[in-house]
Amino acid sequence: MTQEQLADVANIHIGTLRKIERGARGAGDNVIAAIATALGIDPSHLVADRAEAGTPIRRALPAISAAIAAYDLPEDGPVRPISDLTEAVGAVQRWRLASQYGQITCLVPGLLTELFRAMATSPGKNPNTPALVVSACRSADAVAYKFGAHDLSARLIDVMRWAAGYTSDDLLDAAIAYVRTETFFAAQAHVAGMRALETALGAV
């Protein structure tokens, strides 16, 4: 990708990009995020000090925590059509696979709240809603675990298990069991983690 192409995709002025590359000027969080999105990478890869790059993400973790605090008692509010929610969850899932944690933290707290409203409104009406909750929580969990918020990670996994209880999808249960093993690894409880995996595999 040339400088011109990158500037165009990132929607920043070519002169600004050239100055940043020469070290003639710094780049704020918004510019770094725009360049990272254009390149399909996490913003932390563009910052020499990874700890500094992770700070905005760590500051966003309480918003995820607040979103899941009342997962089964969400406040009233708007809920988009299931097709729109599916599209939003798909975007968050792509960001998870691309390790774009900053992008996830911007969208996932509000998305989770909206999905919990959808579950409360009609948990059995649309069978896709619980799976969307699981997928969104898994993306949020990727951020929490990556940045050392293991207690938040464990809570997100509990919410995934709660949502999966509204389905009879054994593969979904197995996927959650796989994600749950990270809590065992974080606690150095490897034997219990292997037992949990074997139990999940036996159920499929």
Image (cartoon, helix red, strand yellow):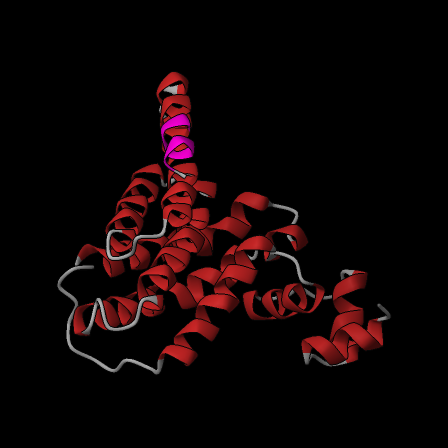
Q: Quadrant of the N terminus?
A: bottom right
For the point 31% across and 61% down, the residue is: 130
For the point 24% across and 66% down, the residue is: 116
Q: Quadrant of residue 72?
A: bottom left
The secondary structure that most of the magenta stretch takes on is helix
Tell me how many marks there are.
Answer: 0
Horizontal side of 12 relative to 154 (left or right) equals: right
Q: Tell me if residue 202 is in the magenta stretch.
A: yes
Horizontal side of 157 relative to 35 (left or right) equals: left
- Tell me which segment is drawn in magenta: 198-203
For the point 35% across and 21% down, the residue is: 192
Horizontal side of 78 relative to 188 (left or right) equals: left
Horizontal side of 179 relative to 14 (left or right) equals: left
Judging depth in this view, the residue of 150 and 136 nearest the camera is 136
For the point 39% across and 49% down, the residue is: 172
Q: Quadrant of the C terminus?
A: top left
Give the residue furthest to the right. Answer: 2
Q: Is residue 138 above or below residue 154?
A: below
Give the percent coordinates (x, y) of residue 65: 27, 53
